[in-house]
Amino acid sequence: MQHWDSLGLEGFLSVHPGIRIAELNDDSIALSGRYHLRAQLAGSQLVDKMYQLRVIIPRAYPEKLPQVIDEGRYIPRSQEYHTYTDGSFCLGSEFRIKFILQNNHSLTAFFENIVDRFLYAVTHRIEFGIFPYGELAHGEQGLADDYGEMFGISGKLAVLRALRALGRRKRESNKLTCPCGCGLRLGLCDYRFTLADFRKTARRRWFRQHLKESFKPLEKPKKKSRSTGSTGKKTDSLQLLITPSLSCHPAYHLIGSDHRYSIFLLYSK
C-alpha cells in the first residue's frame, strides 16, 4: 500500500467516505462507490449530484491515466456526452490531463482538476441543455484544436510541427521549422522557450508515438504534371543544356559557346 499512499489514497478516501477499495493487485487498484459533487461555475447553474463511480488506477500512473466509469448509468453512453459504451469517460486529451497534473498528480488533484470538471460539464448538459465550458470537436480535429490552444498556435500543420519538435532532442528540434509560423528555424525563434515548457509533461517517445497513432500525416502536394494544351496532348517543351563538350547531338541546337562551354537548346516532344 505504500505506493498508493504516496498518491494520497488515504487522504482521498477520508474526504470521500462513500468510496472504498474494491480491488487491489500488482498492476492497479480499483475504487468504487458513491461520489458527491457540489459545484457551480460563475454564470452557470449549480450542480449538486451523487454519482456511482468505479475508478481503475494503474500502478504506472501518472504515465498511464486512470479510467473512470459511471456504474450508476446516469450519463448517456454516447459520443455526445463524451462517454464510451462501457460507461468510461473521455476526460479530455491525454496530453492536457498530464500537463494539468504534472506538478501534482495526487488522487485528490486528479479528481478536483479532471473528474469534477468533467462531471460538472456533462451533468450541466444533461440537466440544463448546454456545456458550460463550450465543447471541442471529437477525434483528430478536437485534438488539433485542444493542442493549438495549449501551444498558442493555430492549424493542424502547426500542431504537428510542435509535436514533432517535442519528440526530438532540443538540438535536433531547433533545426526544424518553427510551429509559430514565423518561417524561421525553431532554434532562431523565441517560441522555442514556450515549447520547452511542455517537455517535462511527457517523454520524447510518448510524443512520437502519439503523433503516429493520433494524427494522419498531411498530404504532400502532388507533383505538377507537364503542361498540356487545350486538346489534352503534351505540348512541346524547351530545355537548356550547358556542357563543356563542343560536339553537337542531332537533338540539340547550338545557341552559343566560348572557349570552355557550349550551350545547346533541346527541342523535344
Image (cartoon, rainbow, N blue to C red):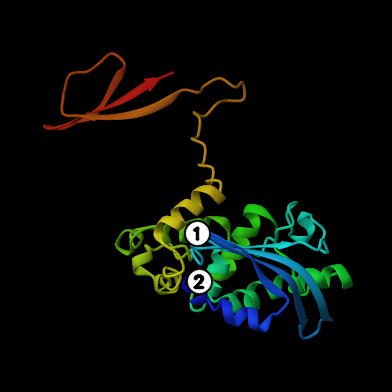
Badge 2 density bin: few <14, some 14–19, many ≥20, Cα 10 Å? few
Q: Nearer the viewer, residue 155 or 3?
A: 3
Task: Point out residue 131 in the picture as x, y percentages from the top left corner.
Answer: 79, 70
Q: Nearer the viewer, residue 172 or 228?
A: 172
Task: Point out residue 163 in the picture as x, y percentages from the top left corner.
Answer: 47, 59
Is 30 rendered above or below residue 245?
Answer: below
In the displayed structure, does residue 224 sit left or right of residue 79?
left
User: Is residue 154 at all visible to an observer of this figure?
Assistant: no
> Which amino acid type is shown beneath numbered disc 1?
Asp
Helix, strand or loop at mark 2: loop
In contact (CB < 8 Å): disc 1 and disc 2: no
Is 256 rendered above or below residue 87?
Answer: above
> Which amino acid type is shown beneath numbered disc 2?
Met
Q: Nearer the viewer, residue 46 or 143?
A: 46
Task: Point out residue 152 in the picture as x, y percentages from the top left corner.
Answer: 54, 71
Q: Nearer the viewer, residue 243 or 8?
A: 8
In the displayed structure, does residue 268 sit left or right of residue 244?
right
Q: Residue shown at 37%/62% (left/top)? A: 185
User: Is residue 155 at all visible to an observer of this figure?
Assistant: yes
For the residues marked 1 and 2, what is the alpha-carbon distance in whole angstroms?
10 Å
Badge 1 density bin: few <14, some 14–19, many ≥20, Cα 10 Å? few
Please tell me the numbered disc located at residue 258. none
Query: In the rendered image, which quarter is residue 156 located in?
Result: bottom right
Q: Residue shown at 56%/19% (left/top)? A: 233
Q: Which residue is label 1 attached to?
A: 26
Query: In the rendered image, which quarter is residue 39 located in?
Result: bottom right
Q: Which residue is label 2 attached to?
A: 1
Image quarter where the C terminus lies is top left
Give the residue at the far right of this rendering. Answer: 128
